[in-house]
Amino acid sequence: MMRNFLSVITRHWIGLLGAVIALIAVVLMLTLVAIQLTGFRGGAYLGIVTYMLLPALFAIGLVLIPIGVIRKRRIDAAAVAHHELLQPGLPVIDLNNERTRGFVIASVLVGLVSVVVLAGATHKGVQEMESVAFCGTVCHTVMEPEHTAFQRSSHSKLTCADCHIGAGADWFVKSKISGSWQMVSVALNLYPTPIPSPVHNLRPARDTCEQCHWPTKHIGDKLRVRTLFADDEANSESKTVLLMKVGGQQGTTSTGIHWHVDRGIQIRFQSDASRQNIYDVEMKGADGKVRVFKTEDKPAGPVEWRDMDCVDCHNRPSHTFNLPAPEIDSALEDGRIDRTLPFVKREGLRVLSDAKYESKEDARVGITKEIGDFYKTKYAEIAAAKAPQIAAAASALSDIYSWNVFPKMKVTWGTYKSNLGHEDAPGCMRCHDKKHADEGGKKISGSCNLCHVVLAEDEKDPEILKTLKP
Ligand code: HEC
Ligand code: HEC
Ligand code: HEC
Ligand code: HEC
Ligand code: HEC
């Protein structure tokens, strides 16, 4: 039966060609999938080859087969109608003929050499595709914001795949399929700008973050000192000191921020697609009791349920985009901007905040000119005496702009907000807003000491730091 089928489909050269193409495609596809399943990470191109080009080739092969069969049938029918002898559908290769024999041997040799060359080229190409550079730069414009932020993050030694794909075969294949379509959308300019956040099909943090960070390892408190600079002439320095309660489980009781991801705790919430508006919050405690906190606010559109994990607070673990103020503060703190330049904080904020440049190169020129002009017109002496410091400040401000604003992707200050806190975005206050209450009327707490103790807020010379650093 099988033999009969094979002989029918390969009786005409078109069918034979189709069968060969389909077979090669299947073998290559299976080989590539097998290589990838052994933990080999290719990039988007490998994905395209495996999950788009080869299947397409396979389909072409499949289409050719019936065409061959029909062709052959027609030729046979015509032959029968004209009472002619049935012609063989394939060329007759006579290996007794010396020329034919030479040709066949040469073809086999050329074929073998090409296989070796192709295998080498594929190997090299695939190595290339594994790198972060590939993810971040091949679709340069598209991934530029995330790639730039990533390089400045604590995760800069990871690969994009560590969080976006993680371990295991099923997510790998999933990511390859969606990755291939992403490449097509990049090629055809179909991608949205800015790339939407949150990412709705991101792999759950259990499978990614927790490969390296153990949720119950969060213990105790952490001191956070922030240095701020005012917009007066002296750029006056002040400090905010917070004792962050970053702990989770402590013995049998659990106190602190990482309680949400403790084992035994399950929190689900209902939100709109932006995840910025949270409605019902369902919490299952270690004792198995379920409490539902509801708000008076009614959703305007469709809502979905989601299990809370790391990413609901750490939504920018590797792609943190900052606002101008904290960026300038840290540049002033570590000396990239000279703090003796009068009004440099205020002017920095001004030139960064209203800047609307077409590209980062334009921004560099514009920012340098604006800062230079300010000192030339308002502080001529300083402009002359501190020219190198002013140039350095302009350069630092231009860097800050290029790290956070990406005109081509329509990413600007505040496009991607962090949920880790309550400064840039509602963040924690999406639930801790004192509006979410359970049946008994008990609210999710918004008390200022729940998450941190504010030891000093915007103080010139806080007592607490004198105690800690006598
Ligand atoms: C430490 C983990 C981690 C690493 C490493 C990482 N990402 Fe992400 N990325 C995330 C998370 C988490 C989100 C989703 C944020 C959300 O859904 O709110 C995200 C979102 C994105 C988005 C959607 C737009 C946005 O900014 O929210 C893009 C694009 C992206 N990442 C690209 C990359 C690229 C390119 C790399 C490598 C250069 C990379 N990521 C490395 C964790 C990571
Ligand atoms: C492959 C290992 C790995 C994975 C996966 C990973 N991280 Fe990390 N993470 C690290 C390392 C290494 C550091 C740096 C530690 C340091 O600098 O002390 C770090 C630092 C951090 C920090 C503290 C520094 C900061 O930038 O605030 C946070 C928060 C964090 N990771 C969250 C996450 C989240 C959320 C995820 C999942 C989306 C994740 N990590 C996935 C390895 C990983
Ligand atoms: C999806 C809703 C939601 C978000 C977002 C959220 N929380 Fe909570 N949080 C809860 C619920 C529910 C409780 C338990 C309330 C109770 O026990 O009455 C809680 C309790 C806490 C507690 C007390 C833990 C304990 O030991 O009992 C702390 C601390 C806390 N949250 C910090 C934060 C911080 C910090 C953020 C932002 C980075 C945040 N939460 C964001 C829902 C949320
Ligand atoms: C309820 C919100 C919330 C959730 C959920 C959450 N975190 Fe955090 N995490 C925080 C906050 C807030 C901080 C403190 C940030 C700071 O330094 O001010 C923090 C700090 C951290 C740090 C740095 C701790 C240190 O001592 O420097 C790491 C690492 C981290 N989180 C990893 C994770 C991982 C992994 C998960 C998921 C298993 C997770 N977090 C879930 C809010 C959260
Ligand atoms: C649900 C948890 C939670 C509650 C409630 C909360 N905060 Fe915060 N707060 C945070 C987190 C998280 C941060 C971010 C710390 C960081 O920068 O990593 C923060 C940051 C701050 C900062 C520092 C901002 C800066 O300049 O960096 C101040 C000041 C502050 N909170 C004051 C308050 C006050 C006042 C209240 C009471 C009205 C309050 N917080 C309630 C979680 C909370």
Image: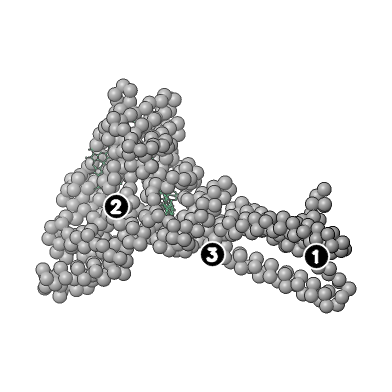
Pinpoint residue 268: horizontal percent, then vertical percent. Answer: 41, 34
Q: Which mark is in front, 3 or 1?
A: 1
Give the structural element (helix, strand or loop) at label 2.
Answer: loop
Towards the viewer: 208 or 236: 208
Q: Which residue position is annotated with label 2?
A: 414
Instruction: Classify mark 2: residues with Cα within 10 Å, few (<14), some (14-19) or many (20+).
Output: some
Q: Earlier in the sequence, mark 2 or mark 3?
A: 3
Q: CA distance from mark 2 to mark 3?
A: 34 Å
Q: Mark 3 and mark 2 in contact (Cβ < 8 Å)?
A: no
Structure colour scheme: one colour
Q: Work out whether residue 10 can be spotted.
A: no
Q: CA distance from mark 1 to mark 2?
A: 67 Å
Q: Which residue position is annotated with label 3?
A: 128
Q: Which residue position is annotated with label 1?
A: 90
Q: Residue at x 36, y 44 (%)?
A: 274
Give the residue type at disc 3: Glu
Residue 140 figure quarter: bottom left
Give the residue type at disc 2: Gly
Relative side of 367 to 30, left or right: left
Q: Mark 2 and mark 1 in contact (Cβ < 8 Å)?
A: no
Q: Work out whether residue 267 can be spotted.
A: yes
Q: How many marks?
A: 3
